[in-house]
Image (tube, grey):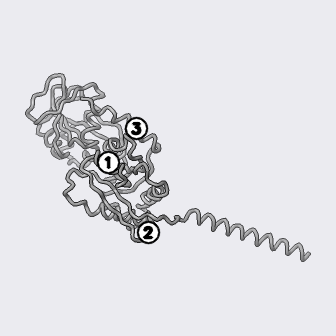
């Protein structure tokens, strides 16, 4: 009887020891492994590189660098490129590890394979957005096809929602677009002329003042328009939705670093300090996984933007 009790005792103890070892093993697997990264650099396309980098962006990259590496003295830096092509060069030279950009700029930078998509960024509190083409209600225009022989105002040549998306929408309607030097330029009857207004407010004012037949901006811009102005315009068309912003990493970033960077960004909004920094960084809500995955999103950008050169 005693021998039987001893056997039961040892089986019992062994069972709980195994559980303890498994728990310890699982905890070890989940715990971040030491990662000796000496620096982490974020690229930024900034048309005027002489201007100082906004302080919230420096805060952001310092926080991320500190969380990514086990090295106490890691440096988080921001490198400014005046154009997308310059950022490509910095990625290829390994002088930039990751960057955040709008969908069209991301397509331009990643299309030759210098970087790959990592995450979606909820910028301005939005995960996705779309473009709207609108007109003055008094214009008598009810369809985008009626813009032939007239002028439309876009934001600027680098804007996804204020230029590329609405331009592609019009191209898909088989309309021919031609950039014009100013509001007074002549527009042929078979074309749609366009000018760049610089800001969404200028676009709205041009439409309300009937200086242009139509304008284009994002649904986010539309949401900020006053009720009086909203009642004076009508929406002619809207594009499909796209991620508001995207995060990409250089193609040869070491896998452990890429994995940790992804983990840090995904968890950033769950940390009080991280959440406050995100708020100061263009009202970023969070980072999340790419809808449909990296390959699906990459293909979507390719299909959407590969015909951008057409007039």
Q: CA distance from mark 2 to mark 3?
A: 38 Å
Q: Nearer the viewer, mark 1 or mark 3?
A: 1
Q: Is residue 108 above or below residue 171?
A: below
Residue 213 visible in the snapshot: no
Residue drawn at (38%, 45%) of the image: 114
Asked if marks 1 and 3 touch (Cβ < 8 Å), the reply is no
Residue drawn at (78%, 71%) of the image: 12
Residue 11 falls in image quadrant: bottom right
Q: Is residue 112 above or below residue 246?
A: above
- For label 2, the residue is 71
Q: Is residue 310 above or below residue 254?
A: above
Secondary element at image label 2: loop
- Residue 293 in picture, x, y percent from top left: 47, 44
Residue nearest the observer in this picture, 87 or 246: 87
Give the mark nearest the N terminus, 2 or 3. 2
Residue 139 falls in image quadrant: top left
- For label 1, the residue is 89
- For label 3, the residue is 300
Secondary element at image label 1: helix
- Residue 145 in picture, x, y percent from top left: 23, 26
**Residue 98: assigned label:** none
Q: CA distance from mark 1 to mark 2?
A: 28 Å
Q: Residue furthest top?
A: 190
Q: Residue furthest left?
A: 184
């Amino acid at each position: 009887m005693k021998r039987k009790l001893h056997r039961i005792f040892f089986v019992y103890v062994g069972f709980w020891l195994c559980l303890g070892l498994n728990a310890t093993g699982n905890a070890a697997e989940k715990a971040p492994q030491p990662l000796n990264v000496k620096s982490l650099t974020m690229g930024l396309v900034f048309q005027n590189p002489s201007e100082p980098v906004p302080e919230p962006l420096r805060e952001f990259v310092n926080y991320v660098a500190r969380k990514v590496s086990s090295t106490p003295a890691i440096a988080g830096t921001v490198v400014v490129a005046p154009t997308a092509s310059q950022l490509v060069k910095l990625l290829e030279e390994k002088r930039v590890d990751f960057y955040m950009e709008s969908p069209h700029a991301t397509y331009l930078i990643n299309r030759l394979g210098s970087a790959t998509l990592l995450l979606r960024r909820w910028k301005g509190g939005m995960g996705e957005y779309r473009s709207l083409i609108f007109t003055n209600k008094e214009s008598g225009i009810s369809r985008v096809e009626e813009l032939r022989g007239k002028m439309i105002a876009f934001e600027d040549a680098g804007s996804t929602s204020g230029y590329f998306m609405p331009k592609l929408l019009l191209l898909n309607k088989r309309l021919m677009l031609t950039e014009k030097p100013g509001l007074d330029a002549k527009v042929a009857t078979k074309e749609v002329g366009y000018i760049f207004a610089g800001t969404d407010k200028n676009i709205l004012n041009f439409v309300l003042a009937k200086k242009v037949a139509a304008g284009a901006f994002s649904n986010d811009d539309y949401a900020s328009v006053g009720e009086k102005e909203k009642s004076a315009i009508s929406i002619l068309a809207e594009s499909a939705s796209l991620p508001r912003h995207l995060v990409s990493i250089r193609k040869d970033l070491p896998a452990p670093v890429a994995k940790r960077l992804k983990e840090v960004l995904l968890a950033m909004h769950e940390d009080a300090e991280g959440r406050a920094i995100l708020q100061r960084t263009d009202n970023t809500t969070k980072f999340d996984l790419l809808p449909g995955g990296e390959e699906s999103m990459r293909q979507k950008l390719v299909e959407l933007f590969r015909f951008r050169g057409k007039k």
